[in-house]
Structures are given as C-alpha cells and as structure tokens.
Amino acid sequence: MDRTKFSDKSPGRCVPIPTLRGTDWAFIPHPMPPTWEIDDSIWQLLVEAKEALGTLNGIGQVLPDPKLLLRPLQGREAITSSNIEGTFVTAHELLLFEMNPSEPSKANDKKAEWQEVHNYSKSLEEGIKLLEEMPFCNRLIRKMHSALMHGVRGRDKMPGEFRKHQVQIGSSGKFIPPPSPEVEALMANLEQYVNNSESTYDPLIKSFIVHYQFETIHPFLDGNGRIGRAILALMIYKWLGHASPWLYMSAFFEKFKDEYMDSLYRVSAEGNWNRWISFCLRGATEQSRDSVNRCHQLNRLRKEFYSRVDSKTSRTYDLIDALFSSPVVQVASLKRRFGVTYPTAKADVQALVSVGILQEISDFKPRTFYSKEIMDIAYRDEAPLVAPTAPEPPSSPPDFVV
C-alpha cells in the first residue's frame, strides 16, 4: 500500500507489516467518533434524503401487507450486493433455487453462486430477527456473518469469527486493512459508538460513518462487503424508526461502483468525509424514490391481478399475494401450501395462466411458472439513476474492493 497517498488529514495511521514481498503498510483507522465537522453543502442533501425516506416509510405503512412487497426489494438487494463482489446471479436463477435450496457439491458448481446470494437474504432475515431481542452489537454481526457463509465458498474462512490473519483489498494491495491483532479492539470501539445515543450526527449520517468504519476494519476473512451493506440497511431501518427495512443501497453502490470504492478510499487517505457522505445521501434519496416507485407499481399490479381473475375465492387472492413473495411457482408446491389436491392446484395455475398473470418457463422440469410482470417491476434496473454531480478525478486508481 502506498502510504504517500495518505495525508495528515487521514483519520488513521499507516503501520508497517511483514509480507512475502517484504515490508508493506496497513491502515489502522482512529477510534470512533470521527472529528469531522459537517460541511454546509451536506445539509440540503440530508434534508432531501430524509424527506424521500419519510415518503418511503409512509408508503410502506399504508400497504395492505407490507411483507408482500418487501420481499421483492430484499431479493433485489441480495442480487445487487453480490454483484458488487463479482457473483452474478439472475432473479430467475435465485428464485428457482429458493424453491428447493440445497448445498453445492463442489466449489465451482453454479449452485454455489445461487447459495451465496440466497444466504445474503437469510443473513438479512437473521439480523432483522435478532434486532427484536438485542441491540446492534458484535454478537449480532457475527451471527449474520455465520448465516452468510453457511455452506458456501469461504465457509472455511472462520464464519462468524473475526479474522486472525492479514487481508488486503484488491489484488495489488492498494488498500490493506488493519493487522489482525487490532481487529477486536477496533470492533469493540465500533460497537460502543453504534450504541452511543449521544452522537452529534444525524442517524442517517451516522449509519454511513459506521459503514465506512466497518469496511475499513474489514473484520472477517471474507464477506465483509455483503455483511456491511446488510448492516447498513438495518441501521437505517432501526435508527430512523421505520416500520420495516425499506431502503437498500446496493443497487446505487453497484451502479456507481468506482465512485463507491474511491469515496471509501478517500476518507482513509485524505479524511474526505464530505465526498463520502454526499455520495451516500444522494444514494439514499435515489434509492428511496426508486423503492417508492416500485411499491406503487407492485401495489397497482396486485389490484389489477385481483380484477383479472374470474374466481373471486379467498384462495385465489391468497395465491396472487403469494406471487409477490415468490413469483416463481410449481403446482406441487401450491398443493402443499394451500392443502388442496393436485388437480385443484393445477386448475388454479391454469386459471392464472389464462389471464396472463402466470406463464410457463420453457424446457424446465418439473413444470414451473412465473409472473413476468412482477419480475419486471421487482428486479429490473430502474434507469437512469442520478449519478453524484461533478465527481472529482480519483487521487489514485480506485481499488477499494469490499
């Protein structure tokens, strides 16, 4: 790591470490809280982000069943967060895998990628459940990491445990996180800061400060980026008093991945908190508006589906609602779910096919059906997202891969 890139405004220090190629340098961030003072340019961005988030939470609370629309948003988050790490899975692949999940037999099995993305959703669900009985703490983070790494590549890398070895970010080591003996103390300090109610920063800004610190510490051998983004979603949910975790930032971070990585790096190298926080606040605004749009569209589509069907039975409505949680179905699974005979479940599916709610996935056995309209709204890329304005040229090649 080139320590000459780190100025005297850096919120940390570079220390020498031994490596196979000789002495190198690692970065140890200063303990929280930071000494950064909010720039005047931040306030308007904060107002816009909080307004957009308030609208999103309000929409979520008036939906007939928020969970039916929350699940597609979480599925998209799992896919996009994994994309940032170089694991590319389509929504169809993920949903088909989730119908009958099983652990991969070998590391290069395509199923291993599906399992990784599926585990992100499980980790997020684990965090939501744990927050009902405990505050944000290292125990919660470790449990989420254990769920993320269960049965996948990296399961040999101490799932649920802070690392005992040195890691580097990027193949060339442009950024090297703290030596492993520093991790426990740094994470203990971060836990204390997270639960300090006397923070001088707005909760939304504080959540982005914590995200930076977590990614900089890089406490695990693998999965730091995904866990960090999942924790970010949960912090925003809890600290802003939302009814559900509605805001997910990974799509924005993936869309502007170079700036995401470079902005993190610039905090460490230059103490440039303004660039990082501005970027995140713009992202919060854009993703809030995007989620509001998707919620409106999904809710309208749900009502339209109701109007299309001839049979107005409660089971028909329940079947339609089930599609918003998982828009891929098989007759046998519906038979089990609704406790009906196979011919009845098959007739229900054919009724939805006849009015265009479902269509069959060709050449797939057993016969499988999906709702294209739900998939298009829930998982498509919403273009264009608004990029941060007038980005500065990178001070060094972006290589902050998290």
Image: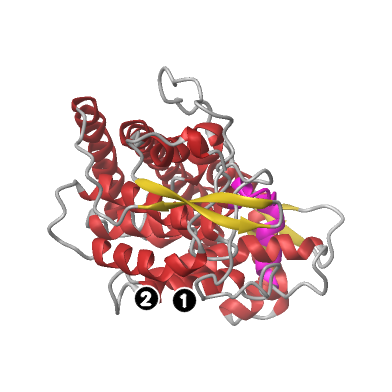
Q: Is residue 349 visible?
A: no
What's the amino acid at mark 2? Leu
Asked if marks 1 and 2 touch (Cβ < 8 Å), the reply is yes
Residue at figure coordinates x 41%, y 71% from the top left: 184
Q: Secondary structure under badge 2?
A: helix
Q: CA distance from mark 1 to mark 2?
A: 9 Å
User: Where does the image place residue 329, in percent across and percent down from the top left?
Assistant: 67, 64
Give the camera-side residue of 72 and 31: 31
State which tag comes first along the sequence, 1 or 2: 2
Q: Residues within 10 Å of mark 2 (few under 14, many from 20)?
A: some
Give the camera-side residue of 332 and 93: 93
Highlighted range, magenta:
82-100
Q: Is residue 199 left or right of residue 226?
A: left
Residue of label 1: 143
Furthest residue toward right:
363
Residue at figure coordinates x 35%, y 33% from the top left: 272
Residue of label 2: 130
Q: Is residue 91 left or right of residue 138?
A: right
Q: Main secondary structure of the magenta part?
A: helix
Q: Secondary structure under badge 1?
A: helix
What's the amino acid at mark 1? Lys
User: Where does the image place residue 53, in percent across and percent down from the top left?
Assistant: 28, 43
Q: Is residue 89 magenta?
A: yes
Q: Is residue 108 left or right of residue 114?
A: right
Considering only vertical position in the picture, is 275 above or below 302?
Answer: above
